[in-house]
Image: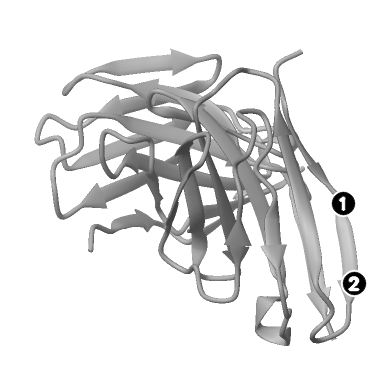
Amino acid sequence: EAQVTQNPRYLITVTGKKLTVTCSQNMNHEYMSWYRQDPGLGLRQIYYSMNVEVTDKGDVPEGYKVSRKEKRNFPLILESPSPNQTSLYFCASSLGREAFFGQGTRLTVV
Amino acid sequence: GQQLNQSPQSMFIQEGEDVSMNCTSSSIFNTWLWYKQDPGEGPVLLIALYKAGELTSNGRLTAQFGITRKDSFLNISASIPSDVGIYFCAGPYNQGGKLIFGQGTELSVKP
């Protein structure tokens, strides 16, 4: 089954403790991206990657890092999480103009 | 930058009613996408439109690509409780794959 898998689904952490949210897709898509979703603000792109070893900033990249060492994986790294990064995060992969989303990771930073 | 304005922001309707929502852009798009997000899940693609004037259906859902290429509409006929969720329009920002999303329309259906 074609899918985008994120882990974990839920995460509560403390300010400053580094964390990684993993994302994996099995559709051999070149383009992958991370979004955060906040009430009233819709989906905002954090980072994207057009292929292996090619990443670039989206609209709200501050406080985040990504890497793309393999085509299927695109982890999101928060080196020093802060409460304003409490949000719902989605990974997506796309081929052409249609994006396929993971189930989301609800992150709470206290 | 480019923005998509989606309206209404929320709708509360009775089961069986028809629903209509729309999305407008300040610039031309060559693709319009409509997604639905169920509570606690990721957005799922409902309908993709690739040509100005195109009208496409997916069950009780019908979407249209406006002839000006700056707007799109989504209609849901005879709504049912499982239609509850947030509906997003989206369009490609560039050829690279980035999408821009509308703010979403939250639909509530009363049985």
Image mark for residue A12:
2
Residue A58: image location, x then y, percent: 42, 59
Disc 1 packing (10 Å; few <14; some 14–19; many ≥20): some
Residue A67 located left or right of residue B6: right
Residue at 73%, 34% in the rendered image:
A24
Residue A44: image location, x then y, percent: 48, 60
User: Is B38 above or below relative to B46?
Assistant: below
Residue B81 located left or right of residue B9: right
Asked if the residue under mark 2 is in contact with the one under mark 1, i.e. CB atoms within 8 Å, the reply is no
Q: Chain of mark 1?
A: A
Residue A74 located left or right of residue B47: right
The amino acid on which the numbered mark 1 sits, given as a three-letter code, is Pro
Residue A73: image location, x then y, percent: 68, 36
As helix, strand or loop, the secondary structure at mark 2 comes to strand
The answer to which quarter of the image holds residue A20 is bottom right
Looking at the rendering, in which quadrant would you find the C terminus of chain A?
A: bottom right
Q: Chain of mark 2?
A: A
As helix, strand or loop, the secondary structure at mark 1 comes to loop
- The residue carrying mark 1 is A8
- Between B28 and B95, the one lying in front of the other is B95
User: Is B95 above or below relative to A48?
Assistant: above
User: Is A42 above or below relative to B34?
Assistant: below
User: Is B34 above or below relative to A77?
Assistant: above
